[in-house]
Amino acid sequence: MTLPRDLNRGTIPGIRPLMSAPQLTLPPIELPVRLPAPTGPTRKFNVAGLFAGIGGIELGMQRSGHDTALLCENDESAAAVLEAQFPDVRLEGDVRKLGRLPKHVDLLTAGFPCQDLSQAGRTTGITGKKSGLISEVFRLLHRQPVPWLLLENVPFMLRLGKGRALDVIMRGLEELGYKWAYRVVDSRAFGLPQRRERVFIVASLEGDPRNILFSDDVGVPETPASSLDAVAHGFYWTEGLRGLGWAVDAVPTLKGGSAIGIPSPPAICLPDGSIVKPDLRDAERMQGFAVNWTAPAESVGRRSLRWRLVGNAVSVPVAKWIGRRLARPGAVALPIPTALEPGMPWPRAAWNVGDGRFATTASAWPVQHKRRSLVEFLRFPPTPLSEKATAGFLSRAQRAKLRFPDGFLDAVSSHLDAMRAAE
């Protein structure tokens, strides 16, 4: 897809302020910010999901009481999953061919492609072929404003190109009359053994998005000191020179892997010193899906493609939390905000309600659900990391200037010896 020049200059093409769009009138910001919970009955939304993937956002919305009116996904294997898991929902393909949204939709969700924004991807930015498709969201909103909007993407977009991608999106929302708030959220807060941070943006023409994203916050819990023989540790065996993706009692962020179906699961160093890769079904569970949620994808492609679908998905419990707050917003109490001036770096949480843009200190842990250890979580037998993969990682790690946890490279070396003996 060739993007219009306007987008390369940092604007959303075709966007003009909508004079008829409802404007949000709010009292002046108090310092510190204190917002009561809105009163009234629990609200039920009709949801349209663009770039739906395997339906992580939409499944979370359904679990919090909302209805799905439309799904749009161009990937054939992901569409096969959606067709099987949401059989009664209208499914469209290429978002560029979608003329307009259903009239009764009042919440638009879009976990738009992150390949051009991810640190692990091409990092070409918002004008990239994939992530530039966000312009289609604005095209549809320009034609038919929707009261509420939920966007999701990788936190690297806050830094990529000095945050230009996020600025393009926020200015596009502001030109359409939306008030927005965003926050980085970690999937571990919801009981999942996966260290996965994502940016969630809530925008509205009629309500205060801060009551959705900032009404819950428990703060980041301290990570207890743990030795390799006490709990499992996750890492990426495909790295080793510049990074490791180290996670204590969890796996690092599940990745999409290769577009041609080469899986990229993380490795886990178990307390007994063995190094394994989790089963695909456990990876589905690490995202909050049921076992074999992605199995319908095998009707149109190889099984390995399912790893990419899982890695690109939105964690279901996070979407469920947002859906519950959309249904019943909560009270907000925040520290004194900091005005965001042009050129300042984007923080991990912010809003534009009131006069200007403001940063806040909301943590990535809105809640803290009880969870089992990673070893207890694994339900299916893992696969030992192969001799070739282990040898390649160890070679890179020994050449790297990284600092590794005490005993970790010894455990890798011992695992390599064990795999060679088994061969």
Image: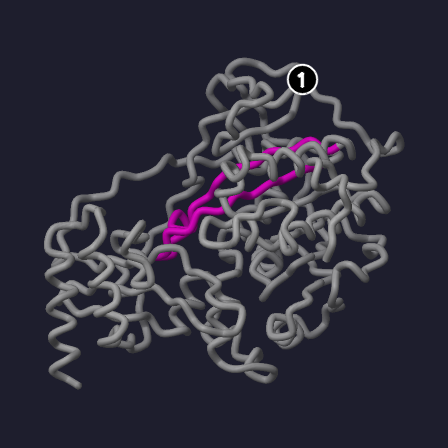
Figure label count: 1
Q: Pick whichever, 179 or 408, lies toward us.
A: 408
Q: The disc labelled 1 sits on which kind of residue?
A: Asp
Q: Is residue 207 visible?
A: yes
Q: Image point 17% across, 86% down: which residue?
A: 423
Q: Pick whichever, 220 or 399, lies toward us.
A: 399
Q: Pick whichever, 118 or 384, lies toward us.
A: 118
Q: Relative to residue 399, is residue 367 drawn left or right?
A: right
Q: Image point 75% across, 34% down: which residue?
A: 206
Q: Is residue 327 visible?
A: no
- Does 108 sit above or below residue 346? below
Answer whether residue 390 is magenta in the image.
no
- Does 25 sit above or below residue 96? above
* Farthest residue, direction front: 399
* Farthest residue, direction right: 20
Residue bearing mark 1: 355
The crowding category of the residue bearing disc 1, from other C-alpha atoms within 10 Å (few below 14, some 14 to 19, many at least 20), is: few
Q: Image point 56% across, 21% down: which residue?
A: 340
Position in image of residue 19 (x %, y %): 88, 30
Q: Which residues are magenta?
A: 178-204
- Please tell me in which quadrant of the rendered image residue 392 appears: bottom left
Position in image of residue 54 (x %, y %): 58, 66
Q: Relative to residue 403, is residue 69 drawn left or right?
A: right
**Which quadrant of the figure contains the N terminus?**
bottom right
Position in image of residue 28 (x %, y %): 65, 14
